[in-house]
Image: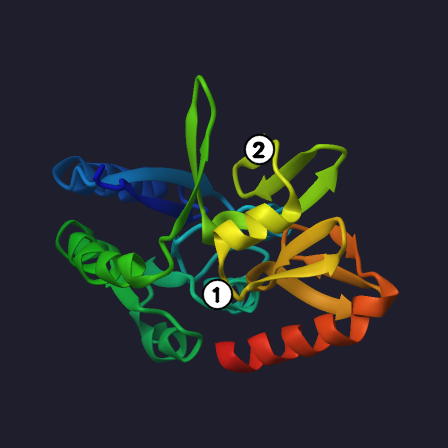
Amino acid sequence: MEEQTKSCHIAIIDDMAADAELIRDVSNKYFEKHKGYRYEIEMYKSGGHLMEQIKEGKYYDIYLLDVEMPEKSGLEIAKEIKGCYPDAFIAFVTNHMQYALSAFEVGASRYISKRQLFDKLPEAYDHLLPKLDLLDNRVYVIESVSNIEKILYRDIYYITKYSKYLTIHHRHGETKVRKTLSIIMDELDSPEFIYIDKGCIANMAHIASCKKEEVVMRNGDTLKISRPRYKQVRECIMAYWRCEK
């Protein structure tokens, strides 16, 4: 069986460009030595820009935050990130060591002094990556004559039906497949996927809110709930959220 390549998406949030680039360089060198990961790194100068991207559906596994930044502090940004993605891993990389206790109160996994970056950031990755590997890494495989595509379950937002085709809306875009919703539901065989309408399946892991007759997804999309299904959908979402706590 083909070994699955692990993925790691990292966001660096630091208003000091030189510091952000150094963090990226140390991260690149780490992953060059750890070949089992397909990784991506993006840098942000402000938390506001990052949160705009998150609300549009952007997702990262690890967030490397400075504490003191313009507009919003790293502590405020960490709270907002955890509100959107409770499983996200946050590490503070900063010169301001006096905020360490507050950082752990907002769910940080590591608090690293920039003076110890070369030693402590690789140690943080050694600690965080095994935890990341324990998260849901199931994949849905789509095969065609010319291509095989693998989509992580946790990357799927929702699936819609149009004519004879389905569109899988996921973190990396959209993928079309010629199947029925009932077949893909059987293939997924996972309780976090529910019918919210006869033509739409939603992943409850990405539902941000549930209003009467609609759900709002974490990528900002709004999906209609059919009236006959509303009570059942609401009960399923509430049960799922209670289990997440």
The answer to whether residue 14 is above or below residue 102 is: above
The reply to whether residue 48 is visible in this rendering is no
Dot 2 and dot 1 residues touching (CB under 8 Å): no
Q: Residue furthest top?
A: 146
Q: Identity of the amino acid at label 1?
A: Ala
The answer to whether residue 192 is above or below residue 163 is: below
Q: Find residue 223 and report its horizontal and vertical position in percent.
A: 77, 54
Q: SS at mark 1?
A: helix
The reply to whether residue 194 is visible in this rendering is yes
Pick whichever, 232 or 70, lies toward us.
Answer: 232
Residue at 40 percent of width and 44 percent of height? 16
Q: Is residue 167 left or right of residue 123?
A: right
| Sequence-first disc among 2 and 1 | 1
Residue at 57 percent of width and 53 percent of height? 185
> Disc 2 marks which residue?
175
Q: SS at mark 2?
A: strand
- Mark 2 or 1, closer to the camera: 2
Residue 212 numbered mark, or none: none
Q: Is residue 102 left or right of residue 190?
A: left
> Disc 1 marks which residue?
78
Q: Is residue 3 left or right of residue 187?
A: left
Estimate the spatial distance between the alpha carbons at disc 2 and disc 1, rounded to whole Å: 32 Å
Residue at 51 percent of width and 63 percent of height? 85
Q: Find residue 166 and report its horizontal and vertical position in percent.
A: 66, 37
Q: Quadrant of the N terminus?
A: top left
Q: How many marks?
A: 2
Q: Identity of the amino acid at label 2?
A: Thr
Q: Quadrant of residue 225?
A: bottom right
Residue at 48 percent of width and 43 percent of height? 44
Q: Find residue 83 and report its horizontal and vertical position in percent.
A: 56, 68
